[in-house]
Image: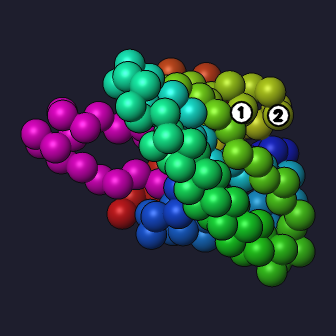
Amino acid sequence: MYKHILVPVDGSDTARKAIGNAVAVAQAFKSEVTVIYVIDPYAFTGVGTDFAYGQAEYLGAATAEANEAIKAAKEAFQAIGVTATGSVVEGHAIYRGILDTAESVGADLIVMGSHGRRGLEKLVLGSVTAQVLSHAHLPVLVVRD
């Protein structure tokens, strides 16, 4: 049923729970798996040249964190005999990076975690998961915190 699963990760506990669910789905359907970590390379845009050094440090740290999260996810899939590909994706809007990658790899399911924010926190911070859900044209399995 699901031939290609996209699993966006961010290193959080919720993402690890989503990986566990994605492992089960991939094993059941013998699916191909792509793991991504989306970073915003323009996090310091518009704050001036004083932050240029900070931006380089941010990108280095974000890329290192992304590579660790991807490595851990790939190992979870390898443990059940499923080979997963992984990559760091850059995108100013995280949800757009997820959806663009889903389209480019031909994913037919996205499995991702939700941080379960409620009330004012959700309103102020927004939710990548909510944005993916409202813009996706394919099934999305959301794993709650």
Residue 5 rendering spot, x and y as whole percentages = 74, 47
Eyeballing the image, is 48 above or below 86? above
- What's the mark number on residue 102? 1
Residue 54 visible in the snapshot: yes
Name of the residue lying farthest toward the front: 50
Residue 71 rendering spot, x and y as whole percentages = 73, 67
Q: From the viewer's perspective, is 109 left or right of 57?
A: right
Nearest the camera: 38 or 131? 38
118 magenta-colored: yes
Residue 37 rendering spot, x and y as whole percentages = 63, 48
Q: Which colouring convention does the figure follow?
A: rainbow
- Secondary structure, mark 2, is helix
Eyeballing the image, is 89 above or below 78? above
Nearest the camera: 89 or 137? 89
Name of the residue lying farthest toward the left: 120
Region rendered in magenta: 113-130
